[in-house]
Image (cartoon, grey):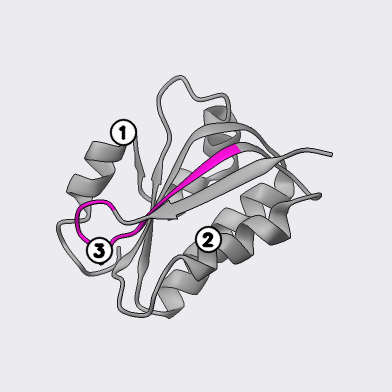
Amino acid sequence: MTVAHVQVHIEGDPRWPVARLDGEVDLSNVDGVARALEAGVSNAAFGLVLDLTGVTYLDSTGLRLLFRLARRLRDRQQALRLVVPVDALIWRVLELSGVPDVVPVSRSRAKALLATSTPSPA
């Protein structure tokens, strides 16, 4: 069994909560991860910054989670922003699956938070 840990906290502007995801995301835990992420975004928020810096493995269910989360937030007039460093183990998987074409990706949390300065979803 693999383990992922989600921590949602407010950093800077409370309209953009930051969630940090660590560990492996796969079929065994993706539902719990999804519930935790969705619970961390209030209706008053402009969106969610999801920091994937600590993710060491992401299977197809984890990729579907990112696409589904982006769609759900967009349906609520909110946006998703990802933080994925250049040397992240999961970068190639995200790139090949087209995630950066759907969700803006920043290389650091600071850059992602700067990108949230415009409240309208992308």
Q: Which residue is mark 1?
A: 108
* Residue at 36% in and 64% down: 79
The mark that comes first in sequence, 3 or 2, is 3
Is 14 located above or below residue 7 in the figure? Answer: below
Marks 3 and 1: which is nearer the front?
Answer: 3
Residue 106 screen position, x and y as percent: 32, 39
Q: Is residue 39 magenta?
A: no
Rendered image quadrant of residue 5: top right
Q: Is residue 21 magenta?
A: yes
Other-residue count near label 3 (Cα within 10 Å), few / some / many at <14 / 14–19 / ≥20: some
Quarter of the picture containing the C terminus is bottom left
Residue 87 screen position, x and y as percent: 46, 19
Residue 102 screen position, x and y as percent: 45, 54
Separation (CA) of disc 3 from disc 1:
19 Å
Query: What segment carries the magenta color?
Result: 11-22
Other-residue count near label 1 (Cα within 10 Å), few / some / many at <14 / 14–19 / ≥20: some
The mark that comes first in sequence, 3 or 1, is 3
Count of marks, rendered view: 3
Q: Which mark is residue 14?
A: 3
